[in-house]
Image (tube, coloured by chain):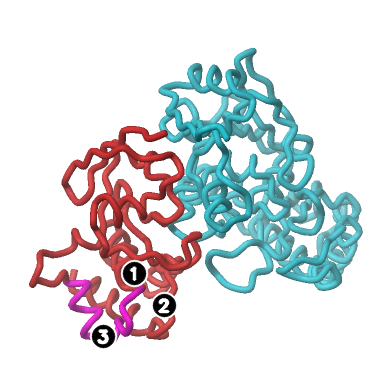
Chain colours: A cyan, B red
Amino acid sequence: MIERTYREPADLAEARAMLAQHEGARVVAGGTDLVVAARSGKSPLPQRLVAIHRLRELSGIEPTADGGLRIGALTTHAELEASALVVESWSALADASALVGSPATRHLGTLGGNVCNASPAMELGSPLLVFDAHVELASAEGSRRVPFGSFVTGPGRTSAQTGELMTAVVLPAPEPRGRMGTAYTRLEYRLAMEIAVVGAAAMIRVDHAGRCVEARIALTAVAPTCVRAAEAEQVLRGSAADEARIEQAAQAAAAAARPIDDVRASAPYRSAMVPVIVRRALTRALDRARTGAR
Amino acid sequence: MRYPLAIEVNGIVYEEEIEPHRSLLSVLRGELGLTGTKEGCDDSECGACMVLLDGRPVNSCSFLALQAGGRRVETVESLSKPGELHPLQAAFLEEGGVQCGFCTPGMLMSARSLLDRSTHPTEAEIKRHLSGNLCRCTGYAGIVRAVMKVAAAG
């Protein structure tokens, strides 16, 4: 058995070099997934730890030149939920961050950790899908951007290559058409230290007459990854987005769900709850679009 | 393999040699002998191990000790000198916020981190801030009352 090693790179270049050097090296930031999984016996602590919590290059929430947002991978859930920029223009992401774990989890847990842990129940996944987010990856060879939807490939699996480190999430500027409202909500059994039983993010854009010009819906914890609900989106586009249409879209969202039975819920229960949670997310997003409330 | 760890706990800098898998909690209770912080579930569910890291609450059972290097840690022992009570400790006793006492150190540290940042938190804010701390005895009402009492006293 090799002895467990622990290294703290001083900057991104050193981190990339360390990850390139050892194939089995694993990154730890806040440790709220990695270390907790080791404590609970779910998966052992990796043998080669690269602790990146001091990398300044990976922190910060910065507007991009084209009106989007670049969020460093080390940004914590607490920073996301408190960011005026995120709350105002990417509300669903703030909603989701505020639901993660407890105050302690939110102060330590990071955006990069939530994304790379790739849980089907990850709170940030569905908001990132409806915002068409990209994941920025760096390696010793250079950097690249991958659409979030193709980055997470299955439970605990991503398309990151050996030696690659996630550095940021990039959100494109909201389209100028109409007024946008977004929201994320979940079914939960308790209010803290909880994971989504079923979750849904909604983005809806309405014109001056209140008609829906664009809609996006994504589901959490009902498939191997967070997934878009394309049929439900199509029900809303071009409609008045009234109560009947919202209900029709919520029912249509169930088509995208392929839930499993697990300790948290049975598959039939999850399926039955998809329309309920989608309706709540859509209603909240629509209210935000129409009233400007956040 | 052990790695050097210089860690500031309650204003004192300690220097230890620690293996990578060791939790902050195990170093606090073991090497440093600070047994006020409790081990409950040992996987971040219960909050009995809550300490402050750079002023923010952290489940020390599931935080790698080496990652606390160069940072400021505060435990329940920092609240008061022997024979004295911090206003939060006094309020917990007065309001019936303590029965077996096992969750109390974590509750106190979570409450303190809130009061350090927010001088007049609402009852809802207090409940949200303590939501990562479980108590199996008191039913929480006394704990929330105690924090509200200290908040009201400013």
Rendered residue at 81%/54% (across/down): A223
Mark 1 vs 3, N-terminal side: 3
Q: Which residue is mark 1?
A: B107
Label 1 amino acid? Answer: Met
Q: Position of residue B82 (x, y in %)?
A: 10, 68
Label 3 amino acid? Answer: Glu
Whether residue A110 appears in this view of the structure is: yes
> Mark 1 touching mark 2, by CB under 8 A?
yes
Q: Same chain, marks 1 and 2?
A: yes
Q: Position of residue A188 (x, y in %)?
A: 64, 69
C-alpha span from label 1 to label 3: 14 Å
Which mark is drawn over residue B135? 2
Which mark is drawn over residue B147? none
For disc 2, the neighbor class at 10 Å (few under 14, some 14 to 19, many from 20) is many
The chain containing the residue under callout 1 comes to: B
Q: Determine if the magenta segment contains residue B130.
A: no
Give the residues drawn in magenta, as a range: B87-102
Q: On the image, which quarter does residue A178 sit in?
A: top right
Is residue A163 found left or right of A279 in the rendered image? left
Rendered residue at 53%/31% (across/down): A63
Q: Position of residue A15 (x, y in %)?
A: 51, 23
Q: Which residue is mark 3?
A: B95
Q: Mark 1, mark 3: which one is toward the viewer? A: 1
* Image quarter hosting the N terminus of chain A: top right
Mark 2 vs 3, N-terminal side: 3
The chain containing the residue under callout 2 comes to: B
Q: Same chain, marks 2 and 3?
A: yes
